[in-house]
Amino acid sequence: MAVIDGVGINVALPAIASNLDVPESSAIWVVTAYQLVVTVSLFPLAALGDKLGYREVYCGGLVVFIAASVVCAFAERLDVMIAARAVQGLGGSAVMTVNLALIRFIFPKTRLGSGIAYNTLVVAVSAAAGPVLAGAILSVADWQWLFLVNLPIGMLILPVSILALPRVPPTDLRFDFAGATLIALSVGAAILTIDWLGRGYPRGQLAIGALAAAVLGWIMIRHQLRSPVPVLAVDLLRISVIRLSALTAVCAYVVQGLSYVSLPFHLHDTMSLPASVVGLSMAAWPIGIMLASVLAGRLIGRYSAGLLGTQGLLLLVSGTGCILWSIMLHSLPVLVASMFICGFGFGLFQSPNTMAIISGSPPARSAAASALQSSSRLLGQTAGAAGAAAIFGLASGPSTMFAIAVAVLFAFFGMVFSSLRLLRA
């Protein structure tokens, strides 16, 4: 539900803007509010999970998500809708931030890699199916049903979660409210500034946003370094394999963000393909992730995350390079095959990389490790999407080619970070 709601609502934005009688540029905040709150609340909610228990935070987040979905469905004003989406993002963040931590306590240690691979597969399927399911619902019902469908599903999931999820004893650690507030403010300022850059806001406003993010970030890092149990996972980043895995993840997700935003414009505007063909063509990437996730689940434990991740990112470098070639050829078959290679390489890297972050952390910091993995994904995707928007706004030539060229560079950097783990094995 959390993933599908994060990607599927985009399809309904025109209908929501028309129904609420607001400009489409304003309706975009229906998506932005959700993503922003998820991003800024991951680490604070992870710390809360350590304090209260993972199952409790998961189930509490599920209740908030369901309730906010109902409010979204009956909202008659944009401000109410945006506020409800922000609350829904808080619930979705609570679910996502302790999800991998719970998986660590559900699967035995020898099967943890398979559990993470299953989770990766579910996320990939949900991301691929989200726009399709949203389009199917909108073809037979109003946009409100995109939110109302969460009610029966959530009411089924909630009792199962209460009964089946393991109860992990909470720690006696003090919850750092000041640290959580500083993280929310600094990360929120950074994400908003990236979003403004992608939307072409005035340079003065961008400078103020960047300055605020830098100052708040400096204060937050100093506070976290002095904290015995930091809300931000700076203690985990001192572990080399986790630090390198997080950097690898950010680079890979930047590649995905750049590609997902820029390629539809090439397919639709340059190649003059209808929206249905564009959607089917873009599905090659998540299909590759799905197939590779199944393979990665079998290989985790036999081979190191550094080896599997480096091989996967080598495929990602090759695939993005082939995408550049296909753009010059104006060849749809080559482009689709290249996106499949990218997705397969991405899937081969993703599960072992997540495994390295989760298994490399102390059990008491499982929620923080889960939040670190999720924040690496969100940071990379957001930076990639905003980077693509900036390239399209500033480039005078073939914008998609520039965006994919940058994606090749980030894929290469990710491969380098991943390969450094082999030296520390």
Image: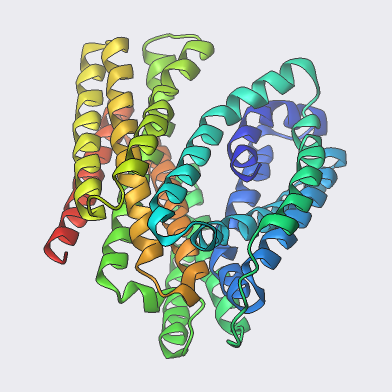
Horizontal side, residue 404 vs residue 59: left or right? left
Identify the residue shown where x is 28% and y is 39%: 407
For residue 84, say whether it is visible: no
Rendered image quadrant of residue 45: bottom right
At horizontal 81% and vertical 45% (from top left) the residue drawn is 155
Q: Is residue 144 above or below residue 101?
A: above
Q: Position of residue 67 (x, y in %)?
A: 82, 51
Q: Is 218 situated left or right of 134 in this image?
A: left
Q: Is residue 326 placed above or below 176 in the rendered structure?
A: above
Chosen colour scheme = rainbow
* Residue occupying image coordinates x 85% and y 42%: 75
Q: How many marks overall?
A: 0
Q: Quarter of the image containing the N terminus?
A: top right
- Considering depth in this image, is 241 or 227 the residue closer to the camera? 241
**Foreground residue, 144 or 364?**
364
* Residue 94 appears in the rendering: yes
Q: State the residue at coordinates (37%, 14%).
A: 270
Side (left or right) of 211 relative to 39: left
Q: Residue 291: x percent and y percent? A: 38, 30
Q: Quadrant of residue 77?
A: top right
Residue 132's x, y, as percent?
60, 23
Q: On the rendered image, what quadrant is the C terminus found in?
A: bottom left
